[in-house]
Amino acid sequence: MRRIDFAPFMVAALENDELVHEAPAIVGCRTPSARAHAAGAAAVASAR
């Protein structure tokens, strides 16, 4: 999984309107959406 440094991304987004819909979410690692994403990533990795 790639980590994205949020602060530099947001600075770039101030100057580039195309990044508005690409902003990374800040969520807890145990939220339902984070767990679903991790499960999907694990399934993809094991299929390789």
Image (cartoon, rainbow, N blue to C red):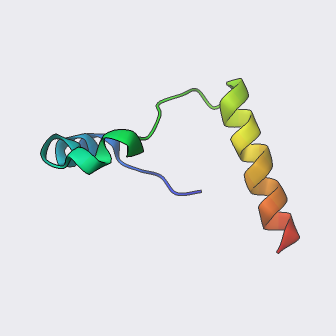
Q: Is residue 43 above or below residue 12?
A: below
Q: Quadrant of the N terminus?
A: bottom right
- The residue depicted at 21 percent of the width and 45 percent of the height is 17
- The residue depicted at 63 percent of the width and 32 percent of the height is 29
Q: Position of residue 2 (x, y in %)?
A: 52, 57
Q: Quadrant of the C terminus?
A: bottom right
Relative side of 42 to 1, left or right:
right
> Visible in this render: residue 8?
no
Q: How many marks?
A: 0
Relative side of 3 to 47, left or right:
left
Relative side of 44 to 1, left or right:
right
Q: Is residue 13 above or below residue 1?
A: above
Q: Position of residue 4 (x, y in %)?
A: 41, 50
Extreme residue toward the left, this view: 15
Relative side of 30 to 17, left or right:
right
Extreme residue toward the bottom, this view: 48
> Visible in this render: residue 18?
yes
Residue 45: quadrant of the picture: bottom right
Q: Position of residue 37 (x, y in %)?
A: 70, 43
- The residue depicted at 35 percent of the width and 47 percent of the height is 5
Residue 42: quadrant of the picture: bottom right
Q: Is residue 27 above or below residue 22?
A: above
- The residue depicted at 47 percent of the width and 34 percent of the height is 25
Which of the two residues, 15 or 42, is positioned nearer the viewer here? 15
Q: Position of residue 22 (x, y in %)?
A: 40, 45
Which of the two residues, 46 or 15, is positioned nearer the viewer here? 15
